[in-house]
Amino acid sequence: MSTILSNAKQENVKALICLIKTNISSELCSIKVTKKDAVVLKNETVVVSCSVNTGPTEPRLPILFEPDIESPWPSGLEVPETLVTLRSGASSRIRI
């Protein structure tokens, strides 16, 4: 995997391998955007800080963020799937 993903951070490669090995296939939780509005200008990429309330999790749990396909996203906005790592505890902050 490290050879194939040579441009990726080693930490992210390890998280991806962990994710592939896990048997968790159901929805873990919902993600909420902070109270600030997120403004995305045309042809721009924006990183949005979010909060995640998962309940107790194991330390450094890799998860795959998948945008809700039924959510009414604005026309032209692309929200990609993103691999993130949750910290242990009942809540975490992530960046999408």
Image (cartoon, rainbow, N blue to C red):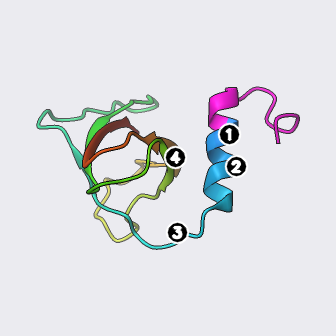
Residue at 44 percent of width and 43 percent of height: 59
Q: Nearer the viewer, mark 4 or mark 1?
A: 1
The mark that comes first in sequence, 2 or 3, is: 2
Q: Secondary structure under badge 1?
A: helix
Alpha-carbon span between mark 1 and mark 3: 17 Å
Determine which of the numbered discs, if any, sits on residue 82 in the image. Answer: 4
Q: Secondary structure under badge 4?
A: strand
The mark that comes first in sequence, 2 or 4, is: 2
Q: Which residue is mark 1?
A: 14
Residue at 70 percent of width and 49 percent of height: 17
- In depth, the one of 93 and 38 nearer the eye is 93
Q: Do callouts 4 and 3 mark residues in contact (Cβ within 8 Å)?
A: no
Determine which of the numbered discs, if any, sits on residue 89 in the image. Answer: none
Q: Secondary structure under badge 2?
A: helix
Alpha-carbon span between mark 2 and mark 4: 14 Å
Direction from residue 64 to residue 86 in the image, left or right: left
